[in-house]
Image (cartoon, grey):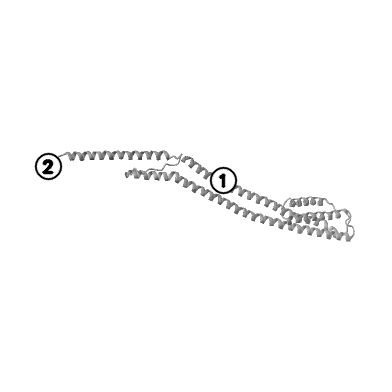
Amino acid sequence: MLRLRLFYGLLTIILLLWGVGAAALILMRESASRFDTRLRIDYRSIDAAQSVRTLTATLNTRYLPSLAGPPPAQVPDRALFDQVKAELEEKVAIIRSDESSQDRWKDVVDRLGQSKNTYFEGYENFFSGNAIDRGQREALLQFQSMQTQRLTDLSENVMNLAEGKLFDGARQLGEDSGKNNLFVVTLVLLGTSIAVMIYFQLVRHLVDPVDSLHRSIEEVRKGNFELTLPEPGQGSEFSKVVSAFNDMATELKQRRGETDENLLHANMVNRAMLEAIPSPVFVLG
């Protein structure tokens, strides 16, 4: 029984330690994974917003200067526009892929998509060749400049919001780390409590019976056969030892009683023999 208790106690401590380590590892991995995912999404959004500004600048540098002068003899080649348009669509799609629950983020992304479409419509009008006279070309140039500025401002808003979410993620990671530390500390305290409980159980079932047996043996050495050990619980390894000691103490007590009785009888016989011997004074008289 004692071996089983020791085994269960040690097994409990081992399992608790493994549980604490595994729980801490899982919590830290989950927090790191969430932060890493948030970091990659926000970084892609920031990079895409910066690319929007770069791509619009590329288109404007290539095509808008022609609106400041007379109309060219032939429509400019739109190969660069088609290529940059596909890249811009891809960058805006990357920004949209961040399904954030913030209302401001959703509003800015929606307005960015609308401005992008309006920006492309201006270039489609440019490539259609409808802007022929000076007034139409100046109006189209001003329109594209306004749309470019709007795209730039919205891209800046996207970058600021993404940076804010990144900082929020870092703060959330710190809060999660604090919760994880509290959880681990709680488990450690629980393990300590269980270890203390196991210690007192071992003292009760192992140390105390040994101390009682030692005190009883000392009393037997002093000639006190009246002291006996209390019977331990059923299944205890000390039950046989305690029973044997109590039987020994009972037998010693019985033999001591027999010895005392024999000594008393011998003493009475000796006294009777001494009384049967005539007194010397009486004989001489």
> Front-most of 253 and 37?
253
Q: In terms of image quadrants, where is residue 207?
A: top left
For mark 2, give the secondary structure.
helix
The amino acid at mark 1 is Gly
**Quadrant where the C terminus lies?**
top left
At mark 1, the secondary structure is helix
Q: In this view, does 17 lie to the left or right of 106?
A: left
Where is residue 191 drawn, in percent x and y? 53, 48
| Disc 1 target residue | 19
Q: Which amino acid does label 2 sit on?
A: Phe
- Label 1 crowd (10 A; few <14 / some 14-19 / many >=20): some
Residue at 68% x, 52% y is: 38
Q: Are the two marked residues, 1 and 2, in contact with CB atoms closer than 8 angstroms? A: no
Gap between marks 1 and 2 measured at Cα: 100 Å
Q: Is residue 143 above or below residue 94?
A: below
- Residue visible at 65% across and 50% down? 34
Q: Nearer the viewer, mark 1 or mark 2?
A: 2
Q: 213 or 265: nearer the eye?
A: 265
Q: How many marks?
A: 2
Residue 250: where, in percent of width, then height? Answer: 35, 39
Location of residue 133 in the rendering, given as x and y in whole percent from the top left corner: 90, 59
Q: Residue 194: x, y in percent? A: 51, 47
Would residue 6 be found to the left or right of residue 270 on screen?
A: right
Residue that mark 2 sits on: 282
